[in-house]
Image (cartoon, rainbow, N blue to C red):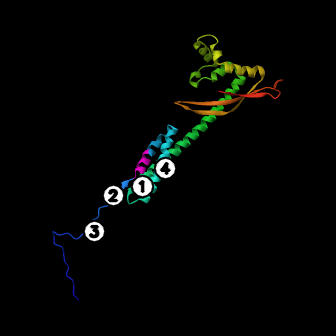
Amino acid sequence: MPIEPKISPHPNESLPVSPIENEIPTYRAISPQAVFSLIFGVFAVLSFAHWIFLISAALAIVLGIIADRKIVRMSDVLTGREIAQAGIALGLIFGLASITTMAVQGWIQVREATKFARTYGNVLSNGTLEEALWYGQNPLVRKGKSPKELVAEMQKAMRGPGMLELENAAITKLKSHIADEGAKLRFVKIEKYGRDKLDYYASALFELEQPASKGHPEGESSPWRC
């Protein structure tokens, strides 16, 4: 049978290249939503400093999901799926972690504020006026000072005699209701709590129960806040 001769290319000639191998790869643009998702995901770390940055975490998740779906649908035009997934991950990690942290801190703050409110209510009911005024001051102000020493300093700082009693007339009146009329002070709940710069604050609601009298056989109660 005839045998076809093998033809070897000339040393200066190259073998023919397949048209498929010679094609230029199609350009694909990075999804803008994926890029913004990653940026907002990085900013979401600030959620630990202030709750307003939770918006960044939410935007990172939403934009990342939109970008991921769009890239899958238009894979021949868009790329950046890894960037979108990184933005979603950062938004979820920082967002959920900051929410959990704030919830735990809030629970601890309410618990400690409740303890202090009950102690303060007991002092208002059974303690002296000096003790009540002492508990009403900032912990840094009353540190290392007895109630009498602190009240003496407060009186010296006042412009005139009787100013301390005037500024604390509400506490003085409350204690007179309890001592003279037999009223009872009952802690109800913590209404507000939060943080102002480096200081924590809380607002407590008490109920003052008046004893029964001729005018009010069943007695009456009124709210009192501190």
- Please tell me in which quadrant of the rendered image residue 82 appears: bottom left
Q: Is residue 220 above or below residue 69?
A: above
| Residue linked to disc 4 | 62
Label at residue 81? 1
Name the residue located 72 percent from the left edge and 23 percent from the top edge. 126
Element carrying mark 4: helix
* Cα distance between the residues tagged 3 and 1: 30 Å
Kind of residue sitting beneath label 4: Val
Which residue bears the numbered disc 2? 27
Q: Position of residue 13 (x, y in %)?
A: 17, 69
Q: Which residues are magenta?
A: 31-39
Label 1 Cα crowd, 10 Å radius (few <14 / some 14-19 / many 20+): many
User: Quadrant of the rendered structure where residue 189 is?
Assistant: top right
| Distance between mark 3 and mark 2 Cα atoms | 18 Å
Do the numbered discs 3 and 2 sit on residues whose CB atoms are within 8 Å? Answer: no
Residue on which disc 3 sits: 19
